[in-house]
Image (cartoon, coloured by chain):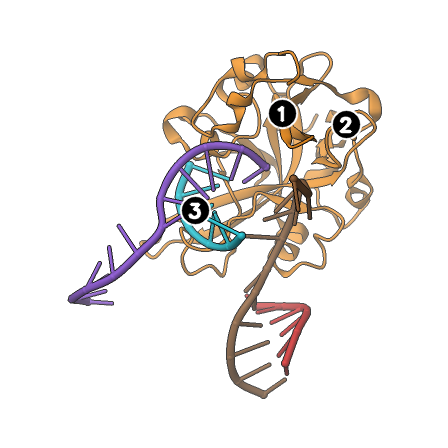
Chain colours: A orange, B brown, C red, D purple, E cyan
Amino acid sequence: MPDGWRRWTESDKVELKGAINVADFNDEEKLGKADAMVRRSPAGAPVLHLLRWGLVPHRSLNPAGGPRPINARSETVLVKPAFRDAFLKRWCLIPADGFYEWQTQEGTKQPFFFSDPQGQVLALAGLWESWRAPDGGLLRTCCILTTAANAQVAPVHDRMPLILAPRSWATWLAGPAGAAQALLVPAPVAALRGWPVSHRVNRVAEYGTDLMAPVAAG
DNA sequence: CCAGACGTTGTT
DNA sequence: GTCTGG
DNA sequence: CCAGACGTTGTT
DNA sequence: GTCTGG
């Protein structure tokens, strides 16, 4: 592992909240001073840094008003103006205990939580942008890449985050010009486990690891 | 050329 | 900024 | 994605 | 029904 790197630790897991949740990533009190994401530094060495959830394009006039996409399709990221520049220059890894997907069943939506079978924190492939505020401050934002669901997630939903195994982290952060293109694929089938969770997860105000707890479906 | 959009998920 | 649509 | 709102006046 | 906010 290169200088400046470290694996996600248990404290990361605690501080970084459970899974992808917009409210969490935008709530500075909940995030505290935790560094939420790994990104590549200008010098090339990966560093931990806080990025805010929801990509604000560099050209944005009003970050509060315009779209702030939280997902970018890996299949089209290179040809979409909104993502192309970030895809070519600004990569990050976004730690998450897991992610939620919703299964549509006869008019209802059942949320599921997916995570690493050994409970390790996942690294999601992300892009980031830097936006210069009128007062001179920088707003750094990010989004994740999505890909087709693997065989485990597919029964629930046809899309899922792009998950990178530790051995691929360096390649991703080195940039998609090279082998990173090959990383834009669904996770291996054995890489995830999933179960139904409470509908409480639907409320962005709800927060905490208890949202990941298994419940009976329905 | 200019004007206007620029993203994803989902789909009863 | 850069792409698409007209 | 889901939850929750769904308005107007005036001002810069 | 459709839009915005999180």
User: CA–CA distance between discs 1 and 2?
Assistant: 30 Å
**The residue under label 2 is which amino acid type?**
Arg
User: At 70% across and 42% down in the image, what residue appears?
Assistant: A174
Examine the rendering and report whether any part of residue A185 can be seen: yes
State which tag comes first along the sequence, 1 or 2.
Answer: 1
Crowd rating for badge 1 (residues with CA inside 10 Å; few <14, some 14–19, many 20+): many
Nearest to the observer: residue A5 or residue A12: A12
**Which corner quadrant of the image does residue A145 belong to?**
top right
Query: Of the numbered discs in the image, which one, if any, rests on residue A111?
Result: 1
Image coords of residue A195 (percent x, y): 69, 17
For discs 1 and 2, the disc positioned in front in the rendered view: 1
Residue at which label 2 appears: A167
User: CA–CA distance between discs 1 and 3?
Assistant: 32 Å
State which tag comes first along the sequence, 1 or 3.
Answer: 1
User: At 72% across and 31% down in the image, what residue appears?
Assistant: A163
Tell if the residue under mark 1 belongs to the same chain as the one under mark 2. Answer: yes
